Amino acid sequence: AQSVTQPDIHITVSEGASLELRCNYSYGATPYLFWYVQSPGQGLQLLLKYFSGDTLVQGIKGFEAEFKRSQSSFNLRKPSVHWSDAAEYFCAVGPGGGGNKLTFGTGTQLKVEL
Amino acid sequence: DTGVSQNPRHKITKRGQNVTFRCDPISEHNRLYWYRQTLGQGPEFLTYFQNEAQLEKSRLLSDRFSAERPKGSFSTLEIQRTEQGDSAMYLCASGGLADNEQFFGPGTRLTVL
C-alpha cells in the first residue's frame, strides 16, 4: 500500500531564511509525487508535481522539490521564505498513470516569523 | 472557468440527520474525486468517478455514504444518519484524462452536533 510520511508537524522559520520540508513515500512502482499548499479556509493548491524526467522540479511561488529514488524522498525547498508562505503543506503520492486516488501525508504547518 | 466549486461551504447538522453536498468540477474534466479531511490530518480518499461511472470507493465510505455523478458533470455526496465522527472537511477535486493533476475545490465543512 502506498503511504507518505511528513516527519515535521510544525516548522518555524524567519522571513528570508531558506526552507526545506521533508517527505518520504512508500510505493511499489514509479510514483507520481505532488506538493500542495493549504491556507486557512482554503482548498488545496498544487505547488509542483513529479512524474518523470529531471528529478529537480520547479513549481509556483519559487518552490522546488527534488525526487530521490534511493531515499524515497521528495523534499520541498524554497531559498527565501516570505511571510505569505505561512500555511500547511501536504505531500502526496499517486500511482503512475494517474487517474486514481492520491495518498497524502499528515502535513507540515509552516510558521514564518517576521 | 472558475475552478472547482462546492456547496454549501459550511453545514451544521444534528446527529441523525441526512446531509448532501454538491461539487461542480472544472467543466472539461472527466474525473472527479471526493476526499475527507479531519483536523490535523491530510485528505483521505473517499471515492472517484470517471464520467458518470464510480470506479473506486474507499473502505472509509460506509453504507451511510453515497456519491453520485448522474450526468458526468456535477456530483453529490450524501451522508445519511450523520454521526459526530462525520464532522470533517469534505473536499472535491477534478482532473482531466490527459494529465494527472487534481484540482481541489474549497471544501464543505461539516459539523455534526
Image: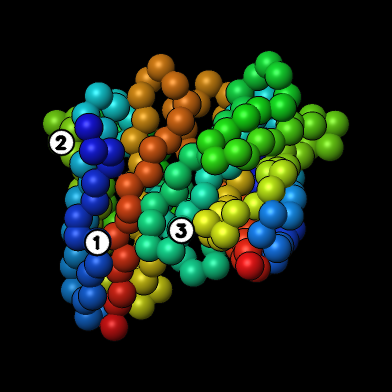
Tell if the residue under mark 1 belongs to the same chain as the one under mark 2.
yes
Compared across the picture, whether A62 is left or right of A73 comes to left
Q: Whole-Å distance between the Cαs marked 3 and 1?
A: 15 Å
Residue A90 horizontal/vertical position (percent): 57, 50
Q: Are marks 2 and 3 on the same chain?
A: no
Name the amino acid type tagged 3.
Answer: Ser
- Mark 1 → mark 2, Cα distance in angstroms: 22 Å
Q: In the image, what residue occupies the spot 54% across and 40% down?
A: A61
Q: Earlier in the sequence, mark 1 or mark 2?
A: 1
Image marks 3 and 1: residues in contact by CB distance under 8 Å: no
**What residue is disc 3 on?**
A39
Q: Nearer the viewer, mark 1 or mark 2?
A: 1
Say yes or no: labels 3 and 1 on the same chain: no
* Image quadrant where one finds the C terminus of chain B: bottom left
Chain containing the residue with disc 2 = B
Task: Label 2: state its secondary structure.
Answer: loop
Q: Residue at x 29, y 26 (%)?
A: B30
Residue picked out by circle 2: B70
Subunit ID for the residue under disc 3 = A
Relative to residue B105, is residue A99 drawn left or right?
right
Label 1 residue SS: loop
Amino acid at dot 1: Arg
